[in-house]
Image (cartoon, rainbow, N blue to C red):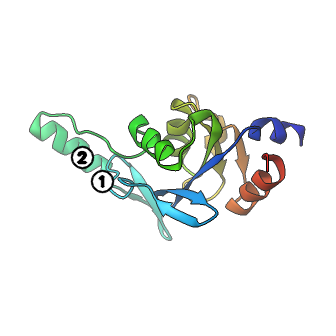
């Protein structure tokens, strides 16, 4: 348990990935961060029948056909996370990202200096815990467990 206390020291803001939308979680509720719905670089999303191709592949095809590079406005773009941090008024070292995507949620947040927990639901795959490039700061079985840890180990 001491490891969790150390991992969560100083957290003042939480970003949640809920149904593919990055949200600000506060006492007054959750508010979508501007630009989150327009994220275009995702490779897949989860349906009840399994993973489905998202718009990222089509974006790459259009880039190739047009001979230009698209500007990514969604995860894992650093600008996206910086915008979210600015919107909730905290520095990167004071925030933690909670999400199910090892690259888009965890990796994107960590590239900006945030800590990140990966939830073992949604896009999570058992191999994520051994990803060659991205390691979450912690893994939880569900959002309720993440919330319990935050309530228990963050400064009040």
Question: Which of 108 and 124 lies nearest the eye of the viewer?
Answer: 108
- Residue 153 seen anywhere in this rendered image of the structure: yes
Task: Decide which of 58, 76 is in the foreground and name it.
Answer: 76
Specify the quadrant of the image occupied by residue 73: top left
Per the image, the residue denoted by label 2 is 59
**Disc 1 element:** loop
Q: Residue furthest right?
A: 1
Q: Is residue 50 above or below residue 4?
A: below
User: In this view of the protein, can residue 125 be seen by the observer?
Assistant: no
Left or right: where 149 falls relative to 1: left
Residue 18: image location, x then y, percent: 53, 61
- The image quadrant that residue 69 belongs to is top left
Q: Residue at x 51, y 43 (%)?
A: 85
Circle 1 residues within 10 Å: few <14, some 14–19, many ≥20: some
Quick check: marks 2 and 1 in contact, CB under 8 Å? yes
- Give the Cα distance between marks 2 and 1: 6 Å
Is label 2 in a helix, a strand or a loop?
helix
Residue at figure coordinates x 54%, y 54% from the top left: 123
């Amino acid at each position: 348990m001491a490891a969790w206390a150390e991992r969560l020291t100083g957290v003042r803001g939480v970003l949640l990935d809920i149904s593919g939308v990055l949200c600000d979680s506060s006492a007054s509720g959750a508010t979508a961060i501007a630009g989150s719905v327009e994220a275009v670089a995702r490779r897949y999303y989860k349906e009840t029948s399994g993973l489905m191709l998202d718009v990222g592949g089509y974006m790459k095809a259009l880039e190739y056909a047009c001979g230009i590079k698209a500007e990514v406005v969604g995860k894992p773009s650093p600008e996206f996370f910086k915008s979210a941090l600015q919107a909730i008024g905290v520095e990167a070292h004071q925030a933690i990202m909670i999400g199910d995507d090892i690259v888009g949620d965890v990796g994107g947040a960590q590239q900006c200096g945030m800590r990140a927990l990966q939830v073992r639901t949604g896009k999570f795959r058992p191999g994520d815990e051994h990803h060659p490039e991205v390691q979450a700061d912690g893994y939880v079985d569900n959002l309720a467990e993440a919330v319990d840890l935050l309530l228990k180990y963050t400064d009040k």
